[in-house]
């Protein structure tokens, strides 16, 4: 391999780069879900999104999934838990949450994922957190508060919980279990085969909800824009983003990988500027500095021991 190729490959396989792209794609997921809330029922959107992802990934990952089926049979309990929390649960709950709560509430609540991951990692594996990582989470969380409050903290004076906020809390719990549960799966499985298996199993649990929606007349409006949005979610927010996140967790651990969750409101703001005609304000710059500063701090602590990641 020539010297000019090596740095490019190192960049392309960096968990920091891939996690950044992961949360960029997931920010598109939340923006589309909010924008299509009135025409794309939550379970319709979840069912169609994962269905597209399975179709796209199947030709590439099915042989590996079949070849390693004995591993999944041996570890079926954790495999089932990962599928239910990461595929069936999290996004379905978020799609329901934005039907009942504001973007500020949902963003604030889901920003609790890194802290929840730390607690879950300690409970499950007695994994401790350094003062540097704790400080990083606080700094990045302040950045989230700045961006979603538009620089006016008085907006939180009327903060009151509703049913949508409770659903968002359940989504945080679901995602935390998923990200921490990844550590319990054998690391020698093919990552694409694993992802396909999780998607298929999680999607199967969505089938009854979708059938019920259709039977009761709750159907998505399949306009050209909605179809394009579902394809985007199925390819980038499902296959690509989940592959990147799983890789990042394997390389960095759930705690440090979940700190990248704080990038979501920044990316959501950028996408809103690009597609919804919103404008950049001073507080966007402040929040970007705080969030990226927090992420940088989180990655400077002691590197946790990680198991090798199989990439092919």
Image (cartoon, rainbow, N blue to C red):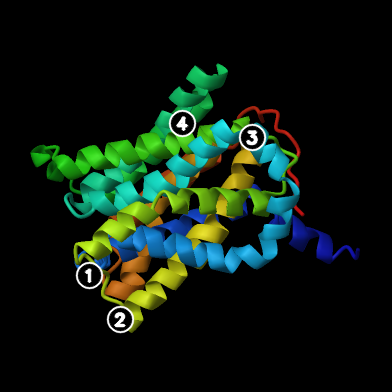
The x and y percentages for residue 256 are: 55, 36
Tag 4 or tag 3, which sits nearer the N-term?
4
Tag 3 or tag 1, which sits nearer the N-term?
1
Q: Quadrant of the C terminus?
A: bottom right
Tag 2 or tag 1, which sits nearer the N-term?
1
Spatial distance from mark 3 to mark 2, Cα to Cα?
Answer: 40 Å
Circle on res. 117:
4
| Side of 34 where 255 appears, left or right | right
The x and y percentages for residue 5 are: 82, 65
Q: Which residue is mark 2?
A: 223
Circle on res. 185:
3
Q: Residue at x 24, y 49 (%)?
A: 97
Do residues under tags 1 and 3 come within 8 Å of each other at their CB atoms? no
Q: Is residue 6 above or below residue 228?
A: above
Do residues under tags 1 and 2 come within 8 Å of each other at their CB atoms? yes
The 10 Å Cα crowd at callout 4, few under 14, some 14 to 19, many 20 or more, is: many
| Side of 203 where 108 appears, left or right | left
Q: Quadrant of the N terminus?
A: bottom right
Q: Secondary structure at mark 1?
A: loop
């Amino acid at each position: 391999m020539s010297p000019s190729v090596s740095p490019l490959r190192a960049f392309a396989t960096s968990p920091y780069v891939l996690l950044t792209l992961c949360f960029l794609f997931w920010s598109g997921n939340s923006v589309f879900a909010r924008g299509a809330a009135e025409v794309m029922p939550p379970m319709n959107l979840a069912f169609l999104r994962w269905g597209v992802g399975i179709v796209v990934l199947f030709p590439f990952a099915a042989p590996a999934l079949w070849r390693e089926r004995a591993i999944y049979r041996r570890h079926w309990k954790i495999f089932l838990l990962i599928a239910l929390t990461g595929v069936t649960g999290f996004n379905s709950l978020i799609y329901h949450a934005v039907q009942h709560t504001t973007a500020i509430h949902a963003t604030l609540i889901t920003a609790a994922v890194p802290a929840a991951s730390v607690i879950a990692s300690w409970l499950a594996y007695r994994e401790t957190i350094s003062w540097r990582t704790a400080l990083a989470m606080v700094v990045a969380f302040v950045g989230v508060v700045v961006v979603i409050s538009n620089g006016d903290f008085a907006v939180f004076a009327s903060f009151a919980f509703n049913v949508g906020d409770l659903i968002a809390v359940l989504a945080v719990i679901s995602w935390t279990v998923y990200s921490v549960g990844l550590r319990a799966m054998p690391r020698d499985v093919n990552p694409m085969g694993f992802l396909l298996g999780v998607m298929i199993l999680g999607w199967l649990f969505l089938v009854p909800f979708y059938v019920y929606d259709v039977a009761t007349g709750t159907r998505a409006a399949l306009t050209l824009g909605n179809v394009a949005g579902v394809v985007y979610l199925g390819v980038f927010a499902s296959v690509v983003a989940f592959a990147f996140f799983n890789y990042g967790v394997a390389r960095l651990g759930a705690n440090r990988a979940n700190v990248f969750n704080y990038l979501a409101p920044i990316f959501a703001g950028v996408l809103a500027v690009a597609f919804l005609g919103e404008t950049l304000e001073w507080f966007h710059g402040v929040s970007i500095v705080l969030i990226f500063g927090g992420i940088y701090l989180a990655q400077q602590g002691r590197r946790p021991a990680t198991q090798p990641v199989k990439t092919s």
